[in-house]
Image (cartoon, rainbow, N blue to C red):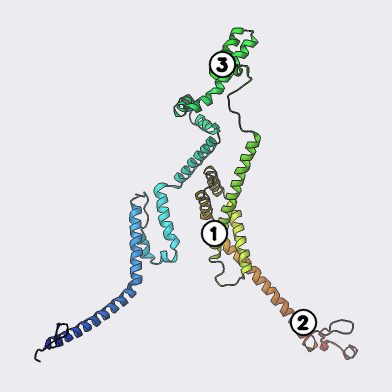
Amino acid sequence: MADTTTVDLAGVTTSTTADQEDMELLNADVLESNAATLEDDTEETKIDDEDTTKLEDDQENKTEIDEEEELEKLKVPFDRPTLKDIKEKYPNIFKDFPQLRDGYFRELQYTAIFPTIEDAKEAFDDVESFSSFRESALAGDPGPVLDSLEAADKKALGNFARNFLPKLYQKNADMYREVTTPILENLVRHIHSAGVKNDNEDLRNSALNISKYLFDTDEIATGKKTTVKTEETPEKNTEKIAEQARKLNLAYAEVQSSIHNNLKKLILADLDPNNVFNPWQRRGIIEEVIKRIGEGLEKDPSHMKIIGSRWKRAELNGYTDEEKTKIVTAYLARAKSLIPITREKVRAAALGTKTKAAADKTSRVESKTRIDKELPGGRAHSESNGRRFQKVDYSKMSDDDILNS
């Protein structure tokens, strides 16, 4: 085809030659290529959909391997099967029982810190002792600390006593003076009392002068005044105790509510898979399970010791949300292990009661039906005197008896 050109009104030259036809062919090739690409993309999408599960499994495996490698850096001193070994023999074990996987890593971390149960118990006892010392110290009672030092090493108790006041002076001079003032007051009073008792005017005057020098008044020596701070009045102590009780009650109510709600959810999870109980029955079963678990845990000394320790720490730290959460977690950690067997016992008892009630009802219905069938007309008839007709065996009666019956 011959080449031709045209010029539009704006002076732009437009090609109407074979080059234009080549351009159209090129566009057709592009469209065809795009269609092929689209088909390829669709096929790849199908492949991606088919491989989604595999990719997720691979990612899960990689995560497990990464976690295991990270934990192996802890250098736990005991041999144990790796996750890879476990999954090779039991491929679906962690899918069927996901809590086992969490338990595996949790136990590994515990073992890295406490190689044996005895180590963990010893650490717990140390924490308990420290908490007790801290509690007594904050309450202003040094007795437990001194008792512990004396029991451990009497020489250590002496060193502690000798170093206490110098260290206190270095730490807080005002507090040092507050602590030593009662000693000085007792000294000048003792000197003044001795002067009076022995009629020694020089001794009395010495006590008065020392008192005036130390305390700016001689009435300290005579016992008329004191600079020692008095303890809080009984009324203030009562108010403090009442406030502490109020905080404890609020924290206890909150903790109990949280524990109760969490237990309800855990118990309900597998309580009634076949929907044989109505809502009222389910609530009753849940409450019974919670009651039995609570009674069981109260008889567990180790559990009560842990919970008691948690409450002491919560009190020392002002019943913060973090401390209350730790109490709930500690309780649920032990309660979870009791839920399956306790729930099964209560559910079995409920099903037994339900079955017995149904059997009793069936027995009553069958008994009534049997009596009705034995009576004439298939139902109970009454004579004028109210007696019910009974079935009569005429084969055992004489003719006279039959006629007179």
Q: In screen coordinates, is 140 left or right of 50?
A: right
| Amino acid on which the number 1 mark rests in the picture | Asn
| Amino acid on which the number 2 mark rests in the picture | Ile
Label located before the other in sequence (2 or 3)? 3
Q: Which mark, residue 317?
A: none
Q: Which residue is mark 1?
A: 262
Q: Evaluate whether residue 92 shows in this view.
A: yes
Q: Quadrant of the C terminus?
A: bottom right
Within 10 Å of the Cα at label 1, are there few (<14), some (14-19), or many (20+) other Cα atoms?
few
For residue 9, which quarter of the picture? Answer: bottom left
Q: Which residue is mark 2?
A: 371
In three-dimensional space, the C-alpha distance between marks 1 and 3, rounded to whole angstroms, equals 68 Å
Q: In screen coordinates, is 390 left or right of 12?
A: right
| Amino acid on which the number 3 mark rests in the picture | Lys
Q: Is residue 166 above or below residue 109?
A: above
How many numbered tags mark residues here? 3
Q: Secondary structure at mark 2?
A: helix
Label located before the other in sequence (1 or 3)? 3
Q: Name the one closer to the observer, 113 or 77.
A: 113
For image coordinates 54% across by 16% down, the residue present is 213
Q: Which residue is mark 3?
A: 212
Q: Is residue 150 above or below residue 339?
A: above
In three-dimensional space, the C-alpha distance between marks 2 and 1, rounded to whole angstroms, equals 53 Å
For image coordinates 55% across by 19% down, the residue present is 215
Which is more foreground, mark 2 or mark 3? 3
